Image (cartoon, rainbow, N blue to C red):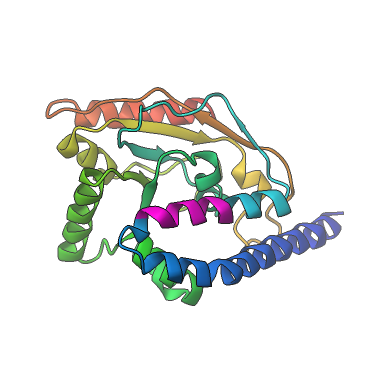
């Protein structure tokens, strides 16, 4: 029975991967055209939303949120637990009204298709090189000044722990919110690890279904409460897993 289930879950992972690659290739020329425009980075967000919705529709992942974001158009730092690649792909269709950039590991630049999308339209971070990490932080501050929000997975990647258990949060997202004065909005992805686990896990779950998301109240960080508020954010996210 376990092997039969594994066959179907891996076929589903292949199908989702096929849809992702197909839509990425189809939309690629449109991204190139948009990036040639003076405000191409902001316009490209709409294409990301379209891409995300296509994946959502063709892979049968409708969303279920407790509420919509309401920041009156002002930038924020969005943080979430990270258990699945769906966390990234569906983020745009979950929060389509507020243009944001991902701040994430530079290792993603090793994938040919994703390299173009991520390098030009988001902020890669190489944590092994302090100078590069510092430049990424400066880029994020500048992006917020230009009206973008920033999306960060504070665990630093998908943890090797048994989901939904979380790794310790890194400081980057909280320092960014502290230095820029924008709020942090914690988000709990409640079941993405059940909908699409790591493709390398032969027996990991994968299936269509509702993407269940819980949006928490915003949190402000000042010069004196970073450690306390970082823990509060983690506790809030964990409370809905």
Q: Residue at x 25, y 44 (%)?
A: 144
View extreme (front): residue? 37
Whether residue 160 is visible, yes or no, is: no
Quick check: 179 left or right of 188? left
Rendered location of residue 78, percent (x, y): 38, 39
Rendered location of residue 6, percent (x, y): 78, 59
Q: Nearer the viewer, residue 122 or 99?
A: 99
Q: Which residues are magenta?
A: 42-51
> Height in image: 171 above or below 50?
above
Q: Residue at x 12, y 29 (%)?
A: 223
Q: Nearer the viewer, residue 54 or 232?
A: 54
Whether residue 88 is visible, yes or no, is: yes
Quick check: 42 left or right of 131? right
Rendered location of residue 30, percent (x, y): 51, 67
Task: Count numbered badges in the picture.
Answer: 0
In magenta segment, residue 177: no
> Height in image: 206 above or below 187?
below
């Amino acid at each position: 029975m376990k092997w039969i289930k594994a066959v179907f879950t891996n076929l589903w992972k292949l199908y989702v991967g096929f849809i992702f690659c197909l839509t990425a290739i189809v939309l690629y020329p449109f991204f190139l055209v948009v990036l040639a425009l003076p405000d191409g980075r902001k316009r490209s967000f709409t294409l990301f939303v379209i891409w995300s919705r296509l994946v959502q529709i063709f892979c049968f992942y409708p969303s279920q949120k407790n509420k919509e974001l309401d920041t009156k158009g002002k930038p924020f730092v969005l943080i979430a637990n990270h258990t699945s690649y769906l966390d990234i792909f569906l983020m745009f269709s979950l929060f389509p009204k507020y243009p944001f950039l991902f701040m994430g590991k530079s290792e993603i630049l090793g994938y040919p298709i994703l390299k173009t999308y991520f390098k030009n339209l988001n902020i890669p971070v190489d944590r092994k090189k302090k100078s590069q990490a510092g430049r990424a932080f400066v880029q994020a501050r500048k992006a917020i000044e230009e009206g973008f929000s920033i999306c960060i997975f504070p665990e630093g990647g998908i943890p090797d722990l048994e989901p939904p258990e979380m790794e310790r949060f890194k400081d980057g997202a909280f320092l960014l919110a502290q230095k820029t004065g924008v709020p942090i909005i914690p988000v709990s992805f409640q079941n993405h690890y059940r909908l699409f686990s790591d493709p390398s896990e032969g027996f990991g779950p994968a299936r269509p279904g509702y993407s269940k998301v819980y949006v928490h109240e915003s949190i402000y960080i000042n010069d004196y409460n970073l450690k306390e508020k970082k823990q509060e954010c983690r506790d809030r996210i964990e409370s809905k897993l």
